[in-house]
Image (cartoon, grey):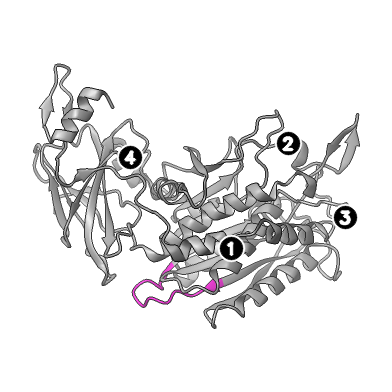
Amino acid sequence: MSIRRKALVATGAVAVGLAGWVSVGSAVGDHHDDGWWRPPPDVRRMLDQVDSRSLQRFDHALVGFGTRHTLSTQTDPTRGIGAARDYIKQQFDQIAQTSGGRMTVALEGYDQPPASRIPVTTRITDVVATLKGTDPQSADRVYIVGAHYDSRITDVLNGTDDAPGANDDGSGTSAVLELARVMAPRPTEATIVFVAYAGEEQGLYGSNHLAEVARQQGWNIQGVLNMDIIGSPVGGSGLRDDRTIRLFSEGVPTSETAAQTARRQTIGGENDGSSRQLARYVKETGENDATDMRVKLVWRRDRFLRSGDQVSFLQRGWAGVRFTEPFENFDHQHQDVRVENGKQFGDLEQFVDFRYLARVTRVIGSSLAALARSPRAPVNARMLTADLGYDTTLRWNANPEPDVVGYEVVWRDSTEALWTNSRRFGNVTEATIPNLNKDDYQVGVRAIDRDGNKSPVAYPIPANA
């Protein structure tokens, strides 16, 4: 923003410059606070309990099963994916004992007939720990945090040789267990589901199964956080950044219908799908002095031509994002364990930085805590378009949470990545921003509770009423 434009915003001017641009602001009520979430003392204590040594113990145990390939043995008590499955369930069971009965643990599985990368009928089993929310008005909301526990090496069908998977995705699975460990003893308003998926390397089989179960059972999923390859700040090219985690999010929803596509093409919104709003929210709540990390937003569903377990949920219309370290090292992904010309290949524990992994885990824990105690995004948000006009008016349904005290309309220039302006309103279901040009700005609305917690932003659709 130019100095001149900043001054106009600060003084509340509605000014038309020589180029015809409009700046809208107000000395009272209009502001942009990109640091609204300052983790309260109880959340800080929880984040302080995230322990790099605990993460390393989890990861070391997972690597110790030799291989966690989907096609590996499921009956050997010390080797293979079956042993890993039982270990993860055992850890969740122990963690659940600290929850006061609020956490339940289950194996969610099915028999996958022969298919791509599955040559014979194979049992696919997700390990699921559900931490039930305690607020009657919020417990129906579900946030899923997950990672895949299966591994692979160069040959995607090799289920016998060692496939340690320390980073891909032992790091993410360890973070899931650690988050469950520090969050289980603490009541949460909304429900959090901790998941270790199977079958990701063979084609997202485990997450696809759980997403379909969730659809059939009518889960009210508000967001899916997928952690996949989050354990090293050092890339194969030698670049290093131990204070950044990448966050991938789609703009145009994977599940968009033809009618929704046609509407979007007339109003824009390519950067305003629910997953993109979730990503913005994670950046707002994951970057703070309790995490000492930067969340780098990447406007892609996943890495270039690649995929992850969040896609199974995107396909069914839910918001989902993926966390991945800033620079990947392909010598330590999907590689046979070997030494060539003095160079070590393979996804080994020695290449995981557990202090970095702890900081990443705190980012996700901070955002999960904010999501679970904040209101849900307003539903049925719409922008009134019955008549041409110079103002922007939004309507939405009142939130069901009794502690919601107001709403905030946010907006940004169409080329901005993040929300740059906002105006707070009371406990109403309609708000107007005078002289805000719909052609030039993207607009949204979010709910605020009495403690100042904010929901993710709801993006409105055009409507006559």
Q: Amino acid at mark 1?
A: Gln
Q: Which residue is mark 2?
A: 330
Query: Upstream in the sequence, badge 2 or badge 3?
Result: 3
- Residue 232, visible in the rendered structure: yes
The quadrant holding residue 111 is bottom right
Q: Residues within 10 Å of mark 2 (few under 14, many from 20)?
A: some
Whether the magenta-drawn stretch holds residue 134 is answered as: yes
Badge number at residue 269 = 4
Which residue carries the number 1 mark?
A: 49
**Which numbered disc, 3 or 1, marks the residue that appears first in the sequence?**
1
Instruction: Identify which amino acid the numbered label 2 is placed on.
Output: Phe
240 or 217: nearer the viewer: 240
Disc 3 + disc 1, Cβ < 8 Å: no
Please state if 287 lies on the left or on the right of 85 as rendered.
left
Query: Which callout, 2 or 4, points to the residue nearer the camera?
Result: 2
Q: Which is more toward the observer, 265 or 427?
A: 427
Instruction: Find residue 91 and report its horizontal and vertical position in percent.
Output: 69, 71
Q: Residues within 10 Å of mark 3 (few under 14, many from 20)?
A: some
Q: Residue at x 14, y 41 (%)?
A: 27
Q: Marks 1 and 2, Cα distance to the nearest angstrom?
A: 32 Å
Q: Could you tell which of marks 1 and 2 lies nearer the N-terminus?
A: 1
The Cα–Cα distance between marks 3 and 4, rounded to whole angstroms, is: 47 Å
Q: Which residue type does callout 4 highlight?
A: Gly
**Residue lying at the far bottom of the rendered structure:** 101
The nearer-to-camera label among 1 and 2 is 1
Which mark, residue 62?
none
User: In this figure, which residue is indicated by the disc labeled 3?
Assistant: 160
Give the residues drawn in magenta, as a range.
130-141
Is residue 418 found inside the magenta-colored segment of the image? no
Amino acid type at mark 3: Thr
x 54%, y 48%: residue: 322
